[in-house]
Image (cartoon, rainbow, N blue to C red):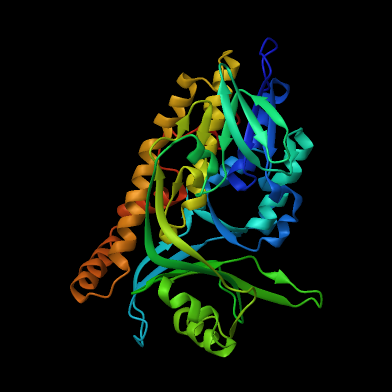
């Protein structure tokens, strides 16, 4: 349903053209149509999105949101469902990696997550935003200043745009968050995440594997098979290799055969011969959360609001939950004739997201601290706990619903697959 006939047209500027910012742009424009001007600003909009070969797990709730936004039919053929998951805990040199916990991938009749490449999803979002009338500006937001019922948004090229609301989706090092004076609670993990796409000889059969190793988790996540120009099928997986930061430069600068040997130690040979399909890239891992998710005519979205360890694969999904909540709050407010940038409206977003983000941050931080060590007493306790969960079907169902983002009855409508 679009905007009401008497609704005053407002402008919302979204700084940051990543998956969260683009999703919010599309959600607002689809819901409010001519009742809102949505302006997306990011220099990255001028680049080919397919150059981004990173992969993400899209939880079932986020998949439902993309279905409600009319995107999933176009994405489904490029998305690999996770059909089951295996968790192991061992030392790097252990000859056998016992399986302590397994999950079937189905929840409420659908996979609990799908693996997608960032480039494919970004390209679809960009096309959808263009088609629906989102204004895409390939320049960044330099600064902003508020004056009464408006905020003046200064672009890098010198132009000033007047808006009712500015959404900062400009990443963990958000300049807009800093300019607004919003505090940032932060600590590094002394770990880096090495990401790459791996080709392998055998079919992964939709299985995700997480090896808990002393330096950090090593995740193998299934990707859609790729059909090469000669008609052959290449099996592929994505890896997220958490490693102590001090070891990473030597690893990435080592001889290709040495790096391949280190990969094989962690990946194993259960899928046959393996090789790097993309150049491995490393990112420092850290925890961060904003002291407040809103400011004067400003809302923080995605990594600008929170940064968590990738141990549970929930970083992007947490940002997409931000999208669903903020889009619903703004849409409902504007249909009632309210100012989308008012303090009352923005505090609804603060209240809606604070508990979920805090809980996820505590969980991922605790899991990383519990599993990223090799102390024998700790290993015995955690392995006992994993084995106990594996023998309790009800508890396993709870965890898989939590990972799918389907547990809460009061979830935003988009996460239930409902239109705004």
How many numbered circles does the render carry?
0
Q: Is residue 52 above or below residue 418?
A: below
Q: Residue at x 69, y 57 (%)?
A: 77
| Foreground residue among 129 and 243 | 243
- The residue under the point 38% across, 59% down is 188
Near-viewer residue (74 or 260): 260
Q: Is residue 1 above or below residue 139?
A: above
The residue sitting at the front extreme is 158
The quarter of the picture where the C terminus appears is top right
Q: Is residue 415 visible?
A: no
**Residue 281: in sight, yes or no?**
yes
Q: Position of residue 366 (x, y in %)?
A: 30, 57
- Residue extending furthest toward the top: 6
Q: Is residue 107 above or below residue 375?
A: above
In-front residue for pair 410/164:
164
Residue 187 in the figure: left or right of residue 326: left
Spot occupied by residue 311 in the image (x, y as percentages of width and height): 41, 61
Q: Quadrant of residue 357?
A: top left
> Can you name the residue that lies furthest to the left here?
377
Which quarter of the figure is the N terminus placed in? top right
In the current view of this chain or complex, which residue is farthest to the right?
A: 230
Would you say 25 lies left or right of 302 here?
right
Q: Name which residue lies at 56% across and 56% down.
A: 114
The x, y position of residue 3, in whole percent, is: 67, 19
Q: At 35% across and 43% down in the image, what residue appears?
A: 358
């Amino acid at each position: 349903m679009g905007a009401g006939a008497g609704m005053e047209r407002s402008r919302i500027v979204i700084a940051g053209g990543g998956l969260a910012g683009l999703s919010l742009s599309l959600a607002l424009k689809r819901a409010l149509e001519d009742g809102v001007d949505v302006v997306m600003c990011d220099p990255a909009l001028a680049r080919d999105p397919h150059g981004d070969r990173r992969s993400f797990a899209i939880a079932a709730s986020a998949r439902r949101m993309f279905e409600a936004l009319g995107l999933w039919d176009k994405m489904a053929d490029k998305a690999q469902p996770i059909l089951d998951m295996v968790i192991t805990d061992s030392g790097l040199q252990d000859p056998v990696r016992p399986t302590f916990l397994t999950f079937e991938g189905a929840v409420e009749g659908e996979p609990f997550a799908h693996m997608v490449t960032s480039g494919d999803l970004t390209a679809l979002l960009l096309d959808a935003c263009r088609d629906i009338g989102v204004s895409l500006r390939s320049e960044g937001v330099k600064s902003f200043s508020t004056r009464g019922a408006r905020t003046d948004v200064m672009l890098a090229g010198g132009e000033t745009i007047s808006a009712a609301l500015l959404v900062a989706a400009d990443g963990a090092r958000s300049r807009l968050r800093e300019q607004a004076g919003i505090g940032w609670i932060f600590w590094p993990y002394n770990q880096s995440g090495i990401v790459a796409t791996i080709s392998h000889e055998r079919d992964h059969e939709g299985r995700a594997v997480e090896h808990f190793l002393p330096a950090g988790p090593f995740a193998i996540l299934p990707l859609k098979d790729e059909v090469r120009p000669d008609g052959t099928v290449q099996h592929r997986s994505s890896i997220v290799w958490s490693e102590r930061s001090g070891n990473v430069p030597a690893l990435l600068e080592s001889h290709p055969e040495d790096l391949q040997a280190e990969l094989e130690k962690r990946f194993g040979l259960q899928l046959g011969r393996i090789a790097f399909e993309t150049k491995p890239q490393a990112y420092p891992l850290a925890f961060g959360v904003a002291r407040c998710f809103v400011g004067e005519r400003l809302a923080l979205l995605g990594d600008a609001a929170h940064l968590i360890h990738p141990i549970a694969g929930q970083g992007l999904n947490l940002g997409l939950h931000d999208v669903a909540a903020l889009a619903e709050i703004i849409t409902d407010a504007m249909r009632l004739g309210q100012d989308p940038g008012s303090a009352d409206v923005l505090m609804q977003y603060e209240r809606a997201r604070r508990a979920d983000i805090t809980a996820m941050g505590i969980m991922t931080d605790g899991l990383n601290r519990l599993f990223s060590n090799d102390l024998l007493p700790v290993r015995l306790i955690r392995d006992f706990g994993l084995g106990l969960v594996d023998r309790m079907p009800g508890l396993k169902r709870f965890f898989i619903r939590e990972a799918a983002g389907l547990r809460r009855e009061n979830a935003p409508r988009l996460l239930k697959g409902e239109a705004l």
